[in-house]
Amino acid sequence: MPLPEHIEPMLATSGEPFDSPAHVFELKWDGVRAMAYAEHGALRMHGRRRRDLAGRYPELAFLAKLPSGTVLDGELVVLQPDGRPDFGAIVGRENMTPARAVAAAAQRPVHYVVFDLLYRGGENWMPRPFAERRAALAALPAAVASPRLLASDGVAAQGRALFAAAQQQALEGIVGKRLDAPYRPGERGDAWIKVKLQQQVHCLILGFEPDEAGDVRSVIVASDFGGELRCVGKVGSGLTVAQRAELRRLLTARRSPRPLVDPGMAGQWVEPGLYCTVRFLERTESGSLRAPVFVGLVPEGAA
């Protein structure tokens, strides 16, 4: 039978670091999720949006040599010299023309880090326990003999220790996977628990982005970066109804015709003096906060 046209990736639920003999713990790779389908010497690759990915990454054409009837789940990553993923580099590859992709592949090639085996020899392995799928997956890199295909390493039972190591290396986090769990496409359950490394920073509120009703859709914030105060983006995730109402009251009372520093975006500006705490994953090269979440206002005098 031919392979399915599309399989939705299984999703993880957020949680806290934990230990469990029923789980294996893997690093959470900071890249682009991708499903690879190898069949009769041809390769298809796409993610949750079903966009073709195989044509964007010519350096991964060797995956067509995988045993026919193979479907893999994994992450496309660009590795820095120290082995850590470079998220900015993989994002930069997403919208390249074919010609630019070929040049980028020669300069900073993408690796495919695989962490699950969904089909083997045309047979559906998704109902099988993760421990069995993982054991079979370990032999696949040798089948193509390319350094661009990596099997995700894991640690049995000791999730807290692996999370501490991820923190020390400033990696994105870890994922705990239950050894007896089947692969459930598109589902977000407790079989996979992701634990993300997050940072917090106090930010000066430069202004806000209003919605159609004039309420606060997001706050535009600045913080220190390289010894300079600069805009680090806008944050709306995490704002509660009560916080939006309080922010509207505070911000509209402090209106200013211009921001303290150039934000590089449109908004409504306020006099400096209000601060908030923002949780985020990492800073980009430009200093912007990646995946920011509003935590709360900083009490006056505590910033």
Image: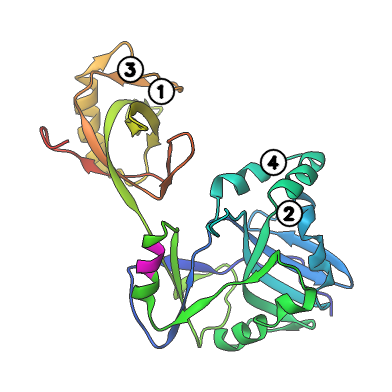
Q: Are marks 4 and 1 in contact (CB under 8 Å)?
A: no
| Residue 244 versus residue 59 in the image, above or below | above
Q: Are marks 3 and 4 in contact (CB under 8 Å)?
A: no
How many discs appear? 4
Residue type, mark 2 in image: Leu
Of the image marks 3 and 4, the number of the one nearer the N terminus = 4
**C-alpha separation, residue under disc 4 versus residue under disc 1:** 25 Å
Q: Is residue 90 left or right of residue 205?
A: right
Question: Which mark is drawn over residue 9?
Answer: none
Q: How is the image coloured?
A: rainbow
Q: Quadrant of the C terminus?
A: top left
**C-alpha separation, residue under disc 3 versus residue under disc 1:** 7 Å
Give the residues in magenta. 163-167
Please name whichever residue, 257 or 78, is drawn nearer the observer in this view of the structure.
78
Please name whichever residue, 56 or 14, is drawn nearer the observer in this view of the structure.
56
Instruction: Name the residue at the top extreme.
Output: 257
Question: Which mark is drawn over residue 259?
Answer: 3
**C-alpha separation, residue under disc 3 versus residue under disc 4:** 33 Å
The residue depicted at 31 percent of the width and 10 percent of the height is 257
Circle 1 residue: 263
Circle 2 residue: 53
Q: Are marks 4 and 2 in contact (CB under 8 Å)?
A: no
**C-alpha separation, residue under disc 4 versus residue under disc 2:** 10 Å
